[in-house]
Amino acid sequence: MTKSALVFDPFSDEYFINPFGIYQRLRDEAPVYYNEQYDFYALSRHEDVAAAFKDFSTYSSANGVTLEEIKSGTHAMAQSIIWMDPPDHRRMRSLVNKVFTPRAIEAQRSVVRERIDHYLSQVDPSSFDAVADFSALFPVEVIATMLGVPVADRQNIRLWLNTALERGPGRSTLSKAGREAMTQTGLLYYNLIQQRRADPEGDMISALIHAEVDRDDGTRTRLDDIEIAGFCTLLGGAGAETVTKLVGTAMVLFDRHRDQWEHLRADRTKIPAAIDEVLRFEGPVQYDMRTTRKEVVLHGITIPQGSAVMLLAASANRDERAFPHADDFDINRDRTQAQNLGFGYGIHSCLGAALARLESAEALDRLLDFIPDYAVDRAGLHRVSMTSVAGYSNVPIRRR
Ligand code: HEM
């Protein structure tokens, strides 16, 4: 039987339902793939993706990190650390590292536990949706509390973000509703920044208002409203969607691998390794985009200067050239086999990784007690069709 022509469309139903078959073909048949329809290149092998993440002088983030940002130039209106190259990135990262300290994150553990217990107390353990009724709800509360967003607006951050990220098959750009949702988010933060300027509190927005950053011209100034709102939007977004997906995917994977769930129940010290394996096997962030600052020749293919390049971290994490038996889900995997790219790699690697690990670990630990013996209703599983992000919006489970 001859193989069908290799088509990789990151906005197709086929891709949203199961990207891993396509990734395998990309790695084997077209490690530098060019998509004519959307005009981008895709790197899929671990070695190439990791090298590109590291090489920020060739693979720039300054034009945006999603296809839409690069093609539309929308990001040029805003300021965000994720869209910066050095030296701006270095300055901003060292500033936000001061606010996003390991201590500040550890201090959230009680908030995380309280929110997890709150949402679990609202559901019936004999039957509930592990995402819609649980993992979608608590992460946004944590980051919103850290930022200083009032209770009434916390869940809105998540709902607006969902609207903004949603893509239908064949639709690669923001919908009208998505644009409105982004405006609402920006307004919320803008108003909060004005309030905190007048009346500071002990939250992250107040800390950012008082933080100073070194500028190109050698001066040292405070952040302006656009910079702070941009950072809040990024944190709120990253904090709202990703852990939600990681926990939902974990419950699906452990349903398929009962023995490993039992193993975790018996040995909770394995939880961090389990989280890393979920992140490797089917992480929430599938890819990040870059723009080439110079011509690149890779696997005999020339990528011209100024090209959009998709770094398929989720494919790299399944590359058998890097991870033996890469398609096996195994929480006992030797974690030194290769770099797990689920949190990115290099200068932009996830600022919230410690918080994400803490939230996911607390959630799994509680779920191990709450539903020690569960089954996923597989007919009710529903995957999101979003740009960059993958996972489930619904994971119905019942007690066995
Ligand atoms: C499982 C959860 C998460 C995953 C899989 C994840 C994944 C990632 C990835 C892949 C990047 C790199 C982006 C790039 O190279 O262009 C990134 C960056 C970032 N993440 Fe996360 N993230 C998670 C949770 C969080 C949380 C909870 C926060 C904060 C509340 C956060 C904040 C950020 C920020 C601010 C950046 C940009 C860092 C920079 O540009 O220097 N992330 N994340």
Image (cartoon, rainbow, N blue to C red):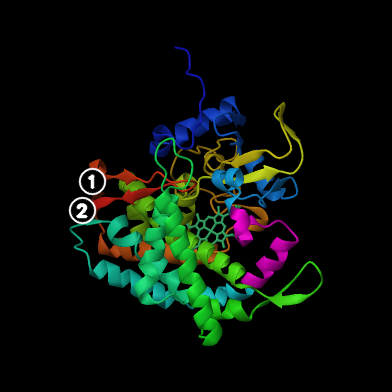
The residue that mark 1 highlights is 377
State the image coordinates of residue 273 (x, y, percent, origin top left).
48, 56
The residue that mark 2 highlights is 398
State the image coordinates of residue 104 (x, y, percent, origin top left).
53, 77
157, 198: nearer the viewer: 198
Numbered range of the magenta stretch = 75-97
Q: Are marks 1 and 2 in contact (CB under 8 Å)?
A: yes
State the image coordinates of residue 366 (x, y, percent, origin top left).
33, 66
Under tag 1, what secondary structure? loop
State the image coordinates of residue 91 (x, y, percent, origin top left).
71, 67
Check disc 2: other Cα within 10 Å, few if <14, some if 14-19, many if 20+.
Answer: some
Q: Residue at x 23, y 46 (%)?
A: 377
Rendered position, 174 above or below 88: above
Q: Earlier in the sequence, mark 1 or mark 2?
A: 1
Q: Is residue 362 visible in this depiction of the protein?
A: no
Q: Residue at x 33, y 51 (%)?
A: 393
Quadrant of residue 96 within the rendered picture:
bottom right
Q: Is residue 209 visible in this depiction of the protein?
A: yes
Q: Which amino acid, by three-letter code, is at mark 1?
A: Asp
Q: Which amino acid, by three-letter code, is at mark 2?
A: Arg
Q: Is residue 30 left or right of residue 183?
A: right
Rendered position, 152 above or below 180: below
Q: Residue at x 53, y 68 (%)?
A: 232
Quadrant of the snapshot with the N terminus: top left
Q: Is most of the magenta stretch helix, strand or loop?
A: helix
